[in-house]
Image (cartoon, helix red, strand yellow):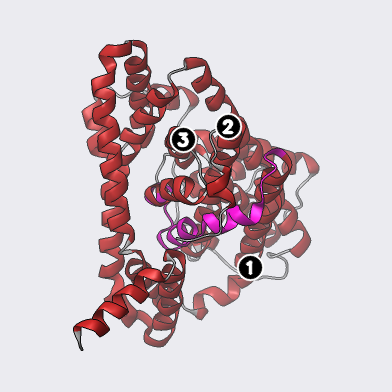
């Protein structure tokens, strides 16, 4: 191939928007998985390399962007106001998410008529108590928290350091500039890693599609369909509605701007793993300031669990229908209240979906062993709920940015270019 042809091909590849390249990788991955079956796992190393690269970014990116975000505010009152708005919005949208999940299961009855036995073999992890959560927020050793990737503790340390740098005034400015330079370097490194995204997504999806065939999905296709439908409704109705009503923003631009993050979230099933891409989307596609995005998104990746809330609502009712248990209005109310409050405490726990589900099921008297029914399809459901979590993080970030006057409308309203 001639040099000119190679250059033309490279130019064409660069002109294709990133989300289209990622989407193409996803579609090709599904096809490869369907054609090759379990043999498609040969492509999994591509996905593993991409996920490792993303994980490499998480801790330094969260830490540096939080410190820079707080020092950029220079106003403790403003930070408190942003923090309060962020948490309230996350809790409100989580309550809506559970309600939508419950309504979808009540309307479509995914568990009715199914005759499925289950054996105890999946144990729900014990949820931490409120005291354990509060004590665990403060790192005994911040270096250990950074090394182990404890996002909650990293957030607490970064917020404390950022506030301290702001309060010492001029003496904190040199350190602030170091963190700012470091954050910029992390953004550039994120761009390099995102160039791998189409190939990584292809490898991940090929493996998933090849290993979760129709024989696993068909008996539970209805509950998967209901969960996915509820997820789409929540994004289109609640998120788009809040942006239009409270922010006076065009929700179509929001949906266009978050596509990169959604595809990575769907393929990786990791909210924290998608954080570098979410930060890029918030600033480059949605026009949110570095300060707001650097503060709101890491908090959201840790405590916002709208997708898991939908999953709770759908699966709790599904299991009740499967077992022939009639839920009362009090039970439905308990699911909404428990799930909303539990979302904060269990978001940082591995297997958070099962932890939250076990809490909800215990509150309404359903046997925890029934969780085993959906264990086989949990990965398929996890992909959807992670996508909703990430979409919610970006919606709240956009709304907070707009309310604080830190959203560039020219960037937000511009036609999508990346």
Q: State the image coordinates of residue 151 (x, y, percent, origin top left).
A: 36, 36
Between marks 2 and 1 in the image, the one whose residue lies nearer the viewer:
2
Tell me what residue is drawn at x 49 percent, y 58 percent: 262
Vertical side of 221 occupied by 315: above or below: above
The single residue placed furthest to the top in the displayed view is 168
* Residue designated by label 1: 225
Looking at the magenta stretch, what is its main secondary structure?
Answer: helix
Label 3 sits on a secondary structure element that is helix
Q: State the image coordinates of residue 255 (x, y, percent, origin top left).
A: 59, 56
Query: Label 2 neighbourhood size at 10 Å, few (<14), some (14-19), many (20+)?
Result: few
Tell me what residue is drawn at x 48 percent, y 34 percent: 292
| Residue 321 occupies quadrant | bottom right
Could you tell me if residue 363 is visible in this image? Answer: yes
Marks 2 and 1, the one that precedes in the sequence? 1
Numbered badge on residue 299:
3
Q: Quadrant of the C terminus?
A: bottom left
The single residue placed furthest to the front in the displayed view is 4
Along the line of sight, which residue is nearer the eye, 13 or 28?
A: 13
Check whether the beta carbons of the residues at disc 1 and disc 3 lie within 8 A of each other. Answer: no
Q: Quadrant of the N terminus?
A: bottom left
Q: Answer left or right for 363 relative to 162.
A: right
Check whether the beta carbons of the residues at disc 2 and disc 1 lie within 8 A of each other. Answer: no
* Residue designated by label 2: 405
Q: State the image coordinates of residue 346 (x, y, percent, origin top left).
A: 48, 38
Could you tell me if residue 51 is visible in this image? Answer: no
Label 1 sits on a secondary structure element that is helix
Residue 250 forms part of the magenta stretch: yes
Along the line of sight, which residue is nearer the eye, 205 or 186?
A: 186
Region in magenta: 246-274
Q: State the image coordinates of residue 108 (x, y, percent, origin top left).
A: 75, 64
Between marks 1 and 3 in the image, the one whose residue lies nearer the viewer:
3
Marks 2 and 3, the one that precedes in the sequence? 3
């Amino acid at each position: 191939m001639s040099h000119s042809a190679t250059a033309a091909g490279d130019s064409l590849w660069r002109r294709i928007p990133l989300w289209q390249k990622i989407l193409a990788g996803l579609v090709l991955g599904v096809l490869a998985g369907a054609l090759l079956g379990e043999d498609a796992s040969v492509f999994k190393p591509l996905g593993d390399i991409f996920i490792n690269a993303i994980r490499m970014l998480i801790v330094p990116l969260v830490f540096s962007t939080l410190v820079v975000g707080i020092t950029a505010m220079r106003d403790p009152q403003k930070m408190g106001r942003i923090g309060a708005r962020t948490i309230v919005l996350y809790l409100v949208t989580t309550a809506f998410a559970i309600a939508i999940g419950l309504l979808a299961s009540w309307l479509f009855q995914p568990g009715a008529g199914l005759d499925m036995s289950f054996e105890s073999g999946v144990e729900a992890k014990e949820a931490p108590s409120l005291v354990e959560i509060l004590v665990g927020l403060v790192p005994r050793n911040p270096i250990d928290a950074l090394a182990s990737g404890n996002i909650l503790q990293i957030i607490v340390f970064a917020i404390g350091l950022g506030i301290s740098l702001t309060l010492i005034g001029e003496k904190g400015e040199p350190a602030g500039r170091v963190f700012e330079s470091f954050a910029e370097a992390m953004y550039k490194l994120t761009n390099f890693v995102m160039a791998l995204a189409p190939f990584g997504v292809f490898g991940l999806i090929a493996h998933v599609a090849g290993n979760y065939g129709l024989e696993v999905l068909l008996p539970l296709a209805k509950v998967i369909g209901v969960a996915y439908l509820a997820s789409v409704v929540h994004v289109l109705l609640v998120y788009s509605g809040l942006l239009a009503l409270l922010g006076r923003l065009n929700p179509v631009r929001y949906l266009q701007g978050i596509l990169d993050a959604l595809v990575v979230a769907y393929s990786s099933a990791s909210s924290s793993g998608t954080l570098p891409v979410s930060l890029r989307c918030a600033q480059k596609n949605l026009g949110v300031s570095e300060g707001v995005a650097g503060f709101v998104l890491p908090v959201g990746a840790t405590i916002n669990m709208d997708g898991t809330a939908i999953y709770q609502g759908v699966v709790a009712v599904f299991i009740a229908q499967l077992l022939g248990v009639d839920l009362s209005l009090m039970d439905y109310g308990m699911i909404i209240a428990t799930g909303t409050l539990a979302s904060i405490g269990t978001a940082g726990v591995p297997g958070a979906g099962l932890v939250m589900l076990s809490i909800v099921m215990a509150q309404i008297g359903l046997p925890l062993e029934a969780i085993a029914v959906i264990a086989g399809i949990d990965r398929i459901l996890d992909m959807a709920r992670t996508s909703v979590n990430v979409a919610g993080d970006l919606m709240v970030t956009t709304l907070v940015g707009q309310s604080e006057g830190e959203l560039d409308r020219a960037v937000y309203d511009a036609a999508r270019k990346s």
